[in-house]
Structures are given as structure tokens and as C-alpha cells.
Amino acid sequence: MLKIRNLESGYSKLRVLKKISMHVDTGEIVTLIGANGAGKTTLLYTIAGMIRSTGGDIVLFDQNLKPCSPQHIVKMGCSLVPEGRQVFSTMGVEDNLILGGYVRYKRDREYSQTAELKAIYDIFPVLRDRKDQLAGTLSGGEQQMLAMGRSLMAGPKLIMMDEPSTGLAPLIVKEIFKIILGLREAGNTVLLVEQNAKAALAIADRGYVLETGKIILQGPADDLLNNSDVQRAYLGRDVDSDTATCDIV
Amino acid sequence: MSLELFSQYIFAGITYGIIYAIVAIGFNIIYNTTGIINFAQGEFVMLGGMSAITLNYYLPLPLAIIGAVLFTMLIGALIEIVFIRWLKNPSVLRLIIITIGLSIIIREIALHVWGDTVRALPYFTGNVVSSVTILGAPISPQVLWVLAVCSCIVILLSLFFKFTPLGKEMQACASNRLAATLCGINAKNMVTFSFMLSAAIGAVAGCVVSPITSSEYDMGTGLAIKGFTVAVLGGLGNSLAAVAAGLLLGIIEAFSIAIGFPLAFQDAISISILLVILFVRPHGLFGNKEAASLKEF
């Protein structure tokens, strides 16, 4: 579904991604973990067409993406839910959702706005209760759900999520991850970028570990969860001296 | 005050008020998609009026007006494409200063092209002396033209922003450009479109008022100040509120003359109102405080 080969990208002179290769197959949840500044968001923005790549290929649905605008990539069926819940805060909740669906509404005569809205409200019942409210007045968790719902309105085949758990209460994070699992069951493919490595690996099929712009580890999520390097670096567990950490606590 | 005099002042107030409102709506449209105030908005009104007068030498009036509106739209699009589109992450302040600079340039070019003579379009129906009597007051038919055209603009626009996909997309760009792009909206085209739309509206206003107020190269500045006052008074971004605020300001001005204020004080009145509003209710008389607090400017 998505194949990336030797991708290089960055901001003007700053090279952030250095020859990244990865792939996402249909029906998978693939997670990308890494510390701040590793290049996770840059990678997603490059796939979404917000940043021009400087080398390598991105092949989405067997089509080379190189000279594509963000609009075209959304139309192709690849949506990005950006970090930090970027909702249209001065507009109503329902308008936010409707806007997400315009790419399809304009092209597809059989697209039914009401049916799509109903499907989204079934996934996120809380949005139905708040559909007439301004999006900016929602809580953080509700805004995250709205941002996800808005992307789903475009009917993406591949949905990319940038740190959906940032700044949310653990209970809400759990709910969001449950919804992501539900998305896969409904036939979607998910590329999930997370700092919360433990939660992300728990629901993912496969994972990639990104460090300073390079992929240093990859494999099935369970293997990564048990990998001692990953545990030390991202899961906050000191495998060599478990007892020592206990003493400090 | 006799009923006749009273209704004459009211009509004068409404006429000016609705013109201010139209200029304010021009501000609002660009504000709504880009979050900036386009201080060249008054120049769109001037360009509309002046180019219609020139075209009217060669073409019948309706065609001249259509031509003038198209010409002003083209200028609006050019301004956006040449001066604004290619800027990467410009700050709001930078954009505003660009529009102020552009307004000065347009005004000076207009001075070179048209000189400083005061011109006017002919009355759409009748002439200077023809009048319709309403509530005992003789009203120029052109006043009715202004009211009708401006009301149509207001109604069509609010329908446009509420119900059409394009209108909603323009709002979405204003609210969050990153998210709009990720929803598959071409934000840059929306901005160009908003400049064209507000240029067109400004030009229409410039044409319908020309017979009453006359047109000259520097008429834009005064209108822009009044329009800005009205936009802020009503609450930036809210077109219906701009109409109410415009009528309010127009009627206040008309009656300030009625009670004996010198004509020269008119601008001082609107600036004072602007200051009071900015101090007391920066989100405007009808603005939503909640929505205003979610905007960055």
C-alpha cells in the first residue's frame, strides 16, 4: 500500500530524514516510534505532500508520489491527522466533519453526507452530542476525536496519525487506541506515530524505530516490545538493573 | 423636526450606512480566509467607480459596471498572486503592512491615470432632480438602487458562506490553514478567491454610490476607515453584524449633522466610536466573545 525507498527530506538546508526505507501493507497498523526530533512528523508531512522530498521514492497505491500536492494525496485516499488536534476551532463540530468529506463529496456523486456523518457519529458518539458546539470549545480528547473523524470523512484507505495521545488523560488515550484498533477491523490501514511507545506497540502489527532521521530497528511489534534496546530507550525500563531503579524510586 | 426632515435624515443615514457595511463586508471576507485586514479595500471601491466611469464613455452603463467589476476582480487577484501568495508563513503584521503599501501605490497610480478631477457615473434611473416620495421625504431613486444592490450582496454572501462548499472551505482556511490543507483544500486558491470576491463587492459598491457621492482617486481612504470602524463595531468576520453596525454608524452621522455638528466632525465621530469599541468591546457589538478568543487576531 505504501512503500518508501531511500527517502530524504528536510527543511531547506536542514536534512532531517536520511535514506529512510519502510513499507505499510494493507490492513496493518504500523507504528513509528522515536524520541523528539527523530523526524517522525517530518516523515508524515513528506508523505502527505506538505514537505517536498529531496531524494528517494514514495509509492502510494502503486503510484509514485513525487510531484504531488497535499490535495492530490488526500484525494488518492491517504489522510493525515496532524499532531496537536488541528480542528477548525471557530467553526461548528458538524461543519468540521463536513469539510473533511468535501474531497469526496465533490467528486463522488454517490457520496452521502448524512450517511457518512452517521457512521462517524457511531464511532464517536460524543461528537453527536456536541455537533452544534464550536470545535474550539471541546476538550482535548474530543478535539482529537473530531480531528480523526474529520479525516475519516474523506474515506481514506491509509490513515496516518501523528501522536494522537499527546496531552490526553490516560483514560482518553485508552479510548483513542481502542478506536484505532476498530479502524483496522473496519478495513483501514493505519500508520501511527507515537511517543507513547508502549501503547503504540501494544496495538500495532509491526513497528519501526526512528532515531536522528534513520530507521535503526524494525520488526513485529511484539519483538520490538521485548527488545532490550527499545525497552531501555523508549519504554523507560532499565533492563540491566531493575533492582537499582527500584531503589531510586 | 418634521417627519419629512426626519425621514430624509434616516434615508441619508441608511444610504451611507449600507455603503460602509459593504466596505466592511469586503474587509470581513479577506479577514475570514486569511486572518488579515486588507487596507487596500477602499481602493477596490475607488477602482470600481473610476473604471466604470471610464468604461461608460465607450459602453452602455450596465456593461460598463460589469466591466469595472471584472477589472477590479482581476486587480484583486493580481495583488494576491504577486504580493501575497509566494510568502512563506508570513506574519499577520507583515501582510497588513503590505496591504497598506499597496493601497498607497494604487491611489498614486489612480492619480496618474485619472487625475484629481471629481467624476460621477450617471444616475441608474432618472437624473439628479428626479425623486420618489417616501414617508413624506423626496428620495433619489439612486438611494433605492444602493439599498437594493447592497441588500442583495449581503443576503447572497451570507447564503454563500453558510451553505456552499466553497464558502465553508474559505472559512476553514481562515480557521486553520494547516488542517484545511490536510482536508484536501487548496488554501492558496481560497485566498486568491477571497481577494477576488471582496474586490468585486468593493467595485459594485463603488459603482452604485458613484452617482450620489462622486468618485475621485482618493475616495478609498475615507471609506476604508469607515468600513474598518464598522467591521470592528459589528465584530470582525461577521457580515450580518457589519450591516447592523453600518446602519448604526450611518444614522449616527446623519443625525449628528441634524443636531448641528459641523460636517467636518463626521470622521472624528467614527474614529471615536472605533476607539471606544476597541477599548470596551474588542470583539464588537454583536461579536461572539467565545469565537473571538479562539482567533489569533
Image (cartoon, rainbow, N blue to C red):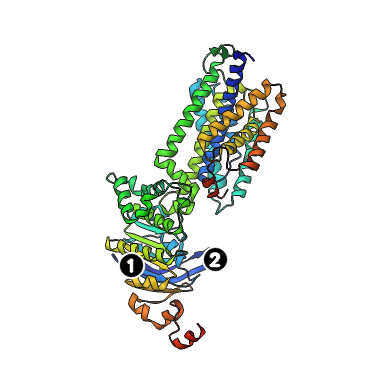
- The spot of residue B112 in percent (x, y) is 66, 32
In this figure, which residue is indicated by the disc labeled 2? A13
Residue at left 42%, top 82%? Answer: A229
* Mark 2 residue type: Lys
Q: Secondary structure at mark 1?
A: strand
Classify 10 Å Cα crowding around label 1: few (below 14), some (14-19), many (20 and above): many
Answer above or below: position of B5 versus A7: above
Nearer to me, B153 or A95? A95
User: How many marks are shown on the rendered structure?
Assistant: 2
Disc 1 and disc 2: Cα gap in Å?
A: 33 Å
Give the chain of mark 2.
A
Task: Classify A48 as above or below B128.
Answer: below
Q: Position of residue B148 (x, y in %)?
A: 49, 23
Nearest the eye: A247 or B187: A247
Residue A104 image position (x, y, % from top left): 33, 48
Disc 1 marks a residue whose amino acid type is Ile
Residue at the image point whose x is 27% and y is 45% from the top: A110
**Residue A227, quarter of the rendered image:** bottom left
Task: Determine whether label 1 and label 2 are within 8 Å by CB.
Answer: no
Q: In the rendered view, would you say B65 is above or below A137?
A: above
Judge whether B250 appears above or below B1 on screen. Answer: below
Residue B73 appears in the figure: no
Residue A82 position within the rendered picture, expressed as x and y whole percent measured from the top left: 44, 59
Q: Which quarter of the image is occupied by the N terminus of chain B?
A: top right
On residue A29, the disc is: 1
